[in-house]
Image: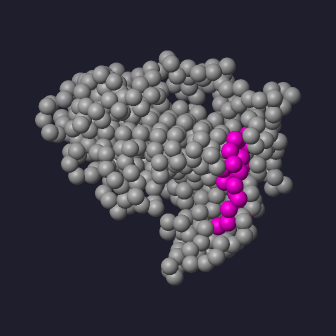
Amino acid sequence: MLARRTASIIRRLAVAAIPASALLVPLPGSAAGAQSSWAHIGAKGRLIYQTTARGDRIPDFSSAGYRGGGMALPFVKTRVKVSPTGSADDTSTIQEALDKVARLPLDAHGERGAVELAPGHFYLLGTLHMHASGVVLRGTAAIGSTASVLEMTGAPHLAISIQGEFQQRTLGQPTWLTDRYVPAGAATIHVADASAIHAGDWLEIVKPVTPAWVHFMGMDHMQREGKPETWVKNDIRVLRRVAAVKGNTIRLQVPLTDSFDARFYASRQASVTRVEVAGRIAGVGVESLQILAPDRRIAYRVDAEFDGIGMDNVVDSWLRYVAFVDTTNSVRIDTRAERLTILGVDVQQDSTVTSHAQPFDFRVSGSQILLDRCTGRGDRVTYVGTQSRSEGPVVVLHCRFSGSGKIEGHQRWSTGFLVDNCEVPDGDMNLRNRGDMGSGQGWTLGWSVLWNSTAGSITVQNPPGALNWSIGDTGQQEDAPMPVFDASPGPMLPRGIIESSGHPVEPASLYLEQLRERSGPQAVAALGYHE
């Protein structure tokens, strides 16, 4: 049985086995030189952005990825090699090797070393923990006769945990925004007193979640089965680093992907606080291996889960050429993760999902996250889904998924999501209001973009006071009301900005063009793309 299943997996997995040199791909062309009015190439060869009357625009997504985008992933030197023990559980053997490397000193590049797994099957009865900076777990290959396979056995559990210990300390008294309105995409803010703020500082910028704003968004009367549901309850907190300060004007290193409108928090000002951030780990990677879970029927959120990799409190780290087979949730990136690249990761789902709720191949919160050239296959799954109160940028670039799943904002107001040159030919892409679904997921996304992508159906809606865009996309553009339970559906919600439907636009890739303009063509080449 195992041999037959392994042979089937080998036939299906593709990208995870491709060497880095083969991922050097040309930038795609577009048809007939069509352009978007919202982001188009001007006479001087640079992007020109249309803005709303209040200054909102499509955000700059180019800081997504390892070390802020445009940086090649490193290859970390092997320090320890591990072979299968032949026992029923290799967890402790691999963990001891990871701990040994974690005790080594960091070098000048922030690296300690890699644990290299030999070809063969390693059995995991428990979770591997990677909690130190500069440590990599690397297999020999993700598929084929030389594959390093981590086979999950025993009770359901998480295969690999990559997690630091986030610590945040307030430095001094908070100031507050003096702007009556900060537009989405803005890199400049004005505060009451910037005298204690300097370039390089971390700022926590708080968007108050008030009854006035929730009412404006139409999210204050949701209920399901006679019980009230809560949409966004807690304030939305954004960490940004300071690029420069002049007087009380602050320029941020990464633009904001949400707007701030003072009319909704007149009695609670939007605070800006200088903070110290510590405890997150960096330079952690998992690469060139396979994680295999039992093939079984799944009632999601009812049955215990065989999950793949969880990442939180981690920065400047990566997953590269990892293959997941039948894991419930394969990759989970949580709120305190930042500047991550997920490259050439493949997820294959044979398990039958019997529940209405669906598992995630890539469950994404965090900021500056890049999913690049990932692939997957499966039905009744969410290929990529954003989560609650997450400020991007999050970029899904040149990813291909087959089956009836979807790429979407999943719940409770995230912003700054870009789906760029992706394909879900038999599934859905959604930037929409999910209403009473789940526990009141409501408006899922604002200020987000589908760009030159393809799906069986596309639902893009404009939330109150915000925009979403579908530009150059191919697929059936759908209208939909807000989903409600125990009541008749309401009117169709307003469509987002739909441009050049069925006809790709220039630039062929928004993310890569933004990256080229910010950091030069060498940054695009560092990711493995060439013109």
Residue 59 picture location, percent across and down: 69, 44
Q: Quadrant of the C terminus?
A: top right
Viewer-side residue, 148 vs 137: 148
* Magenta run includes residue 470: yes
Which image quadrant is residue 87 in?
Answer: top left
Residue 43 picture location, percent across and down: 86, 28
Residue 2 picture location, percent across and down: 24, 35
Which image quadrant is residue 420 in?
Answer: top right
- Highlighted range, magenta: 458-482
Judged left or right of residue 429, residue 498 is right
Residue 168 visible (yes or no): no
Residue 405 visible (yes or no): yes
Viewer-side residue, 466 vs 249: 466
State the residue at coordinates (20%, 26%): 83
State the residue at coordinates (48%, 31%): 344
State the residue at coordinates (31%, 39%): 292
Viewer-side residue, 64 vs 186: 64
Q: Please tell me whether residue 3 is drawn above or below residue 168 in the rendered image.
A: above
